[in-house]
Amino acid sequence: MTKDIRVLLIEDHTMIRMGTALVIEKTDGITLVAQAEDGQQGVDMAKEFLPDVILMDIGLPVIDGIEATRLIKEAGLNAKILIFTSRDSDDDVFAALAAGADGYIMKGATPEQLTSAIVAVNEGTAWLDPAIARLVLSNVQRQISSDNSVTPLMSSKNSKNTFGLTEREMEVLALIVDGLSNPEIAEKLFITRATAKAHVHSILQKLYVDDRTQAAVTAMREGLV
């Protein structure tokens, strides 16, 4: 029997916290183990309760959600951190992902989207709200066009490929991050469309992601491009 996903909710706004807690508690397969009202309390509870997933607001008192995320990741806890916020500025998004967040969802999401995101990050998928995914890809495309690199917040070119990607797959992944379609990748690399499609499929499997957007985010966070 599959065990429930244990969730820690870190949110300082009482009504939002209560509403979110209600959604979680009504969802089969997900259990709310604790709630925190500020970032430091959240870090302490993460160490105490060892949740599978942490729902993390950014605008928290004492220490903000980005710093709390960094501290939890540095503590070596296995919890996946899903940023749950109304903030969608470039700085907040990239700072949160650079701190080690595993996903980013807006507070305007439906209960179904929220629970899907919790399940996804628990399974190791880099879940992004569609609006945030567009922001990330747009930023990367601008960076690539201007200086053929990605934002330093998101990657380090010294990072090693630990996913077993071949040299050709690394080339294809870079083009995915650049926003190219399969036909465009085929044309760029002088390969058939079927071959390009096969490379993309292999990349998704090796990165343990479900789509191209998630592959691009993983590539940036792991310094693969």
Image (cartoon, rainbow, N blue to C red):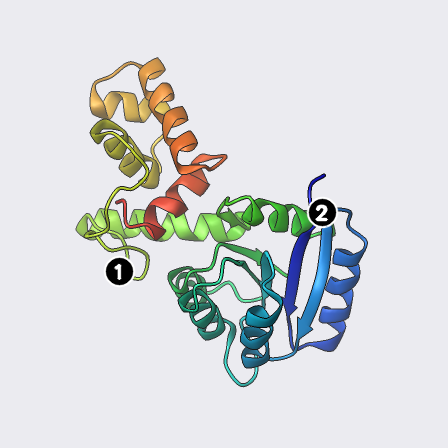
Residue behind mark 1: 152
Which quadrant of the figure has residue 155?
bottom left
Amino acid type, label 1: Pro
Which residue occupies 24% across, 55% down? 156
Residue 108 visible in the current orientation: no
Q: Secondary structure at mark 2?
A: helix
Residue 25 higher or lower than 68, as above or below: above
Q: As rendered, which of 123 and 176 lies closer to the eye?
A: 123
Q: Is residue 46 left or right of residue 29?
A: left
What is the distance, in whole Å, between disc 2 and disc 1 at their CAs? Answer: 34 Å
Amino acid type, label 2: Glu
Tell me the crowding category of disc 2: few under 14, some 14 to 19, or many 20 or more residues within 10 angstroms, Cα based.
Answer: few
Extreme residue toward the front, this view: 1
Q: Is residue 136 left or right of residue 143?
A: right
Where residue 138 appears, x then y in whole percent? 38, 49
Q: Which image quarter is the C terminus in?
A: top left
Where residue 159 appears, x then y in whole percent? 23, 51
Q: As rendered, which of 129 and 215 lies closer to the eye?
A: 215
Q: Which mark is residue 112?
A: 2
Where residue 86 appears, x then y in whole percent? 59, 66
Q: Secondary structure at mark 1?
A: loop
Where residue 18 appears, x then y in whole percent? 77, 69
Tell me the crowding category of disc 1: few under 14, some 14 to 19, or many 20 or more residues within 10 angstroms, Cα based.
Answer: some
Image mark count: 2
Which residue occupies 60% across, 71% down? 48
Q: Is residue 161 left or right of residue 101?
A: left
Q: Return the disc, 2 or 1, that comes first in the chain's sequence.
A: 2
Residue 13 higher or lower than 96, as above or below: below
Residue 153 visible in the current orientation: yes
Q: Does the residue at mark 2 contact the one at mark 1 (Cβ under 8 Å)?
A: no
Which quadrant of the figure has residue 39?
bottom right
Q: Which image quarter is the N terminus in?
A: top right
